[in-house]
């Protein structure tokens, strides 16, 4: 592929053992305008090799591989059992959607990045419980948390205490579990990848907009783009989890 133009490569790679149940579907009235397909046989062999090589990795189930060049699909392949209309789980790429929702809420003057998160969660009983307890590092750190910390994944929480429980279908208050979780560091001082950061950021957006992330993203992002089919998982309280749970087709 010497001297060829830059290609945009979109691959959906998941582990077959990690499928999560879809618990909510949202559709808008507009239709996505499909990209033109001009499949290029001169590159199909090379991309077939990539597809088969990745799919041969033990435990991997490559759903699809799509290559777009100059706004046209020049290569497209789906794994066994997968189709073009399948809503693929986006796993942690969902965090990008949540961060986009935060951006829209910021644009709508509904939130501030430097505002303590407890301000937006003041209706949560756990917030009052923590703030009324004797002073301690945990309470102080919760009070210090901002959306900026959460977006940068530097909350300081020691471990993720909600993901496996939500994905396992457990009925519990994940907001309380997050805010009561132990801290390893003061907010803003250390980076650590943690789904709880994005989960709470998503909860803040949902509380401030009065809509689920699915509904807010549909209104602000997906419907204007013409994406009419997607789904987003929910936890026991009806929150879209923010850190994972978005399902869309390969092309959209």
Image (cartoon, rainbow, N blue to C red):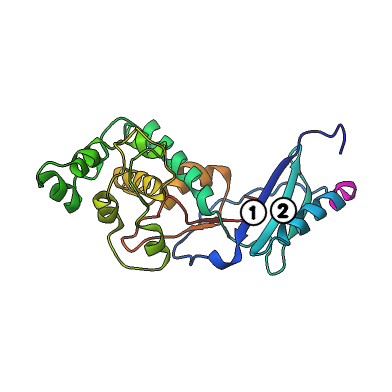
In-front residue for pair 225/40? 40
In this rendering, position of residue 131 left or right of residue 45: left
Please name the residue that numbered disc 2 is placed on: 65
Q: Which residues are magenta?
A: 40-44
Pointers 2 and 1 in contact (CB under 8 A)? Answer: yes
Magenta segment, prevailing SS (helix, strand or loop): helix
Residue 49 among those drawn in magenta: no
Is disc 2 placed on a helix, strand or loop?
strand
In this rendering, position of residue 211 left or right of residue 1: left
Q: Quadrant of the N terminus?
A: top right
Is disc 1 placed on a helix, strand or loop?
strand
In this rendering, position of residue 211 left or right of residue 77: left
| Residue 90 at x, y percent in the picture | 55, 54
User: What residue lies at 79% left-to-right and 50% top-to-bottom?
Assistant: 75
In this rendering, position of residue 153 left or right of residue 12: left
- Residue 51, image quadrant: bottom right
> First in sequence: mark 2 or mark 1?
1
């Amino acid at each position: 592929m010497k001297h060829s133009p830059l290609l945009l490569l979109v691959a959906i790679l998941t582990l077959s053992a990690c499928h999560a149940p879809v618990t909510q579907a949202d559709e808008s009235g507009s239709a996505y305008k499909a990209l033109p397909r001009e499949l290029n046989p001169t590159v199909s062999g090379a991309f077939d090799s990539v597809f088969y090589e990745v799919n041969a990795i033990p435990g991997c189930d490559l759903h699809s591989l799509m290559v777009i060049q100059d706004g046209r699909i020049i290569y497209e392949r789906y794994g066994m059992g997968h189709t073009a209309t399948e809503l693929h789980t986006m796993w942690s790429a969902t965090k990008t959607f949540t961060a986009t929702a935060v951006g829209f809420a910021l644009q709508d003057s509904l939130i501030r990045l430097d505002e303590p998160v407890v301000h937006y969660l003041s209706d949560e009983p756990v917030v009052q419980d923590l703030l009324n307890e004797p002073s301690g590092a945990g309470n102080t750190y919760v009070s210090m948390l901002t959306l900026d910390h959460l977006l940068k994944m530097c909350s300081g929480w020691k471990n993720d205490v909600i993901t496996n429980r939500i994905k396992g279908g457990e009925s519990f208050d994940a907001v309380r579990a997050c805010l009561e979780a132990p801290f390893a560091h003061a907010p803003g001082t250390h980076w650590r990848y943690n789904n709880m950061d994005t989960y709470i950021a998503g909860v803040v957006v949902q509380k401030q907009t009065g809509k689920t992330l699915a509904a807010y993203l549909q209104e602000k992002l997906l419907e204007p783009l013409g994406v009419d089919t997607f789904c987003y998982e929910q936890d026991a309280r009806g929150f879209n989890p923010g850190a994972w749970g978005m399902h869309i087709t390969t092309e959209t």
